[in-house]
Image (cartoon, coloured by chain):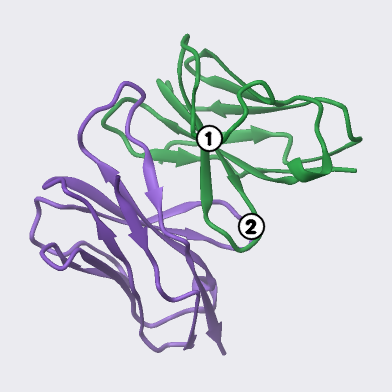
Amino acid sequence: GAVVSQHPSRVICKSGTSVKIECRSLDFQATTMFWYRQFPKQSLMLMATSNEGSKATYEQGVEKDKFLINHASLTLSTLTVTSAHPEDSSFYICSASGDLYNEQFFGPGTRLTVL
Amino acid sequence: AQTVTQSQPEMSVQEAETVTLSCTYDTSESDYYLFWYKQPPSRQMILVIRQEAYKQQNATENRFSVNFQKAAKSFSLKISDSQLGDAAMYFCAYRSVILGEYGNKLVFGAGTILRVKS
């Protein structure tokens, strides 16, 4: 199956700093990428959906100025958590879809801890 | 809007036994996809099985099979000959076939934690 990577796998930062998480599709072109947030023992919560070269569509309640998403190429999307605070600590997962018909392939996730 | 309900927060099964995880969904669409995903302790999401709603035949993948009841909007997962490696959180998910501008979102259930006893 298709492979999606995320970097870093784990990041610890101080409150007030910004953190960038990368999501790459390694062996296919991802026309659509999705960003999820997951709390322990809970389901995945979709944060935003992005198409390559277009602005991301954010789900209701997700602050677009806090969670900046850039889908600059068909193999790379980035999520930047700006001015991170302890409540932003969570597990962030990306997924990628090759075209509108394909299933989503998930990255391994990034654990963010904000001190 | 579509919703997916998993009513079993946790389930346990003895190794080599069979377990069934429940999932119901609500939709007004006639064609859609249903999925079961596995999330082991590594937290990597793994696709277990997929069912297309227009197909009446239940999907199977080795020890994993589904019981798809379209009229009842039910989509349960049966795991046969359970193994220790099956221990994970399992998510049921729905996806429309109607193409949106940004592809098709997955609607997830709350998940079921499956514990396998040796």
Subunit that carries the residue with mark 2: B
**The N terminus of chain B is located in which quarter?**
top left
Pointer 2 and pointer 1 on the same chain: no
* Chain appearing in green on the rendered image: A
Type of amino acid at the residue the image marks with label 1: Val
Image coordinates for residue B19, horizontal then vertical, percent? 37, 82
Figure check: A85 above or below B4: above
Q: Colour of chain B?
A: purple
The residue that appears at 36% across and 85% down in the rendered structure is B18
Residue in the foreground of this view, choosing between B62 and A89 = A89
Subunit that carries the residue with mark 1: A
The residue that appears at 37% across and 43% down in the rendered structure is B106
Horizontal side, residue A31 vs residue A110: left or right = left
Q: Residues within 10 Å of mark 1 (few under 14, many from 20)?
A: many
Residue at mark 1: A4
The residue that appears at 57% across and 90% down in the rendered structure is B118
Type of amino acid at the residue the image marks with label 2: Ser
Residue at mark 2: B42
